Image (cartoon, rainbow, N blue to C red):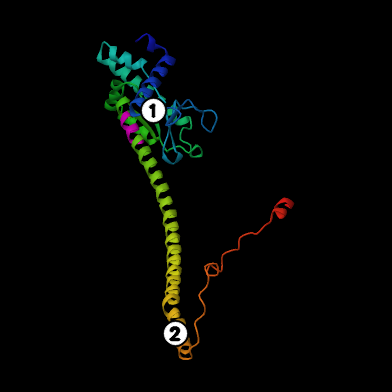
Amino acid sequence: LKNILANTQVRGQWGERMAEDVFRIIGLVEHVNYEKQVTITDGSSRPDFTIFMPDDKKLNMDAKFPLTNYVRYVEAGTEEEAQTHSLAFLRDVRDRAKEVVTKDYINPEDNTLDYVLVFIPNEQMFHHIQQHGATVVEEALRNRVVLCSPISLFAILSVIRHALDNFAIEQASDQILSELAIFDQQWKNFVGQMDTVSRRIDSAQSAFQLLTNTRRRAVDRPLERIKDIRRQRDIPDAPELQPSESEDPLALPESNLVESDIDEN
């Protein structure tokens, strides 16, 4: 493994693979929650990872693995050698952080956040930076560069994932509230129309009751007086109608077509 990681390109690939492992554990999906090696707006910079944030924001991240001087520090035979290689390792970390600053990973035109992540894919190396390189960490933060290890990247991505979930819920809630507003307006229109129809039905029913009661009694009274007059003058009642004559006067007469009419048509 030491011989393999001696190659700078392989170390970079190793760091990217470890970062992707963290992404996968968190549940982030490539092309959905993040992209790899996508050139940003300036056309010359290409971060290792671009993480999609709420409100179409982006967070860029590079994986850096300054291993050479750290290995020399670990394998140093004397305290003096260890101190020398430790300082060299911290310089490497500072240089990697400065490289990120010069790559324009923070770009309002590209809708990025105002900080960038630098992933150190080894907990022991990251712990050494935190313990012996406080000035390196502070300088990086002043330049809006956040150094992170696999564990701290896990924590950062967990917060991002939670923010994405909340944002999705908020968007869904806004859509639901918008639909509820439309429903409320339509419901008011429906109730208003129902009230109008109800008033018209009540009015029609009142008019019908007026016809069947008051108006009918008003018409029946003169008819009864007419009958009394007829009886007083011995005027006979009208003869009873034959069955054919008592049929509904509104009924249409049956067709009396003859065969000749049918043949002609």
Mark 1 Cα shell of 10 Å, populated few (<14), some (14-19), many (≥20)? many
Q: Which residue is mark 2?
A: 224
Q: Nearer the viewer, residue 65 or 30?
A: 30
Of the residues shown, which amino acid type is indicated by label 1?
Answer: Val
Where residue 212 sits in the image (x, y, percent)?
43, 75
Residue at 45% x, 71% y is: 204
Q: In the image, is 41 to the left or to the right of 141?
A: right
Q: Tell me the magenta residue range.
A: 154-160
Where residue 166 sits in the image (x, y, percent)?
35, 41
The reply to whether discs 2 and 1 touch (Cβ–Cβ < 8 Å) is no
Of the residues shown, which amino acid type is indicated by label 2?
Answer: Glu
Q: Is residue 113 above or below residue 219?
A: above
Q: Nearer the viewer, residue 191 or 126?
A: 191
Give the farthest residue toward the top: 3
Q: In the image, is 191 to the left or to the right of 245?
A: left
Q: Which residue is mark 1?
A: 118
Residue at 43% x, 69% y is: 199
| Magenta region, main secondary structure | helix
Q: Would you identify the image quadrant in which residue 30 lies? A: top left
Numbered badge on residue 78: none
Which mark's residue is nearer the viewer, 2 or 1? 2
Residue at 42% x, 14% y is: 10
Give the farthest residue toward the bottom: 233
Q: Is residue 3 above or below residue 233?
A: above
Give the farthest residue toward the right: 264
Q: Is residue 256 above or below residue 155?
A: below
How far apart are labels 2 and 1 at the CA level? 108 Å
Of the image marks 2 and 1, the number of the one nearer the N terminus: 1
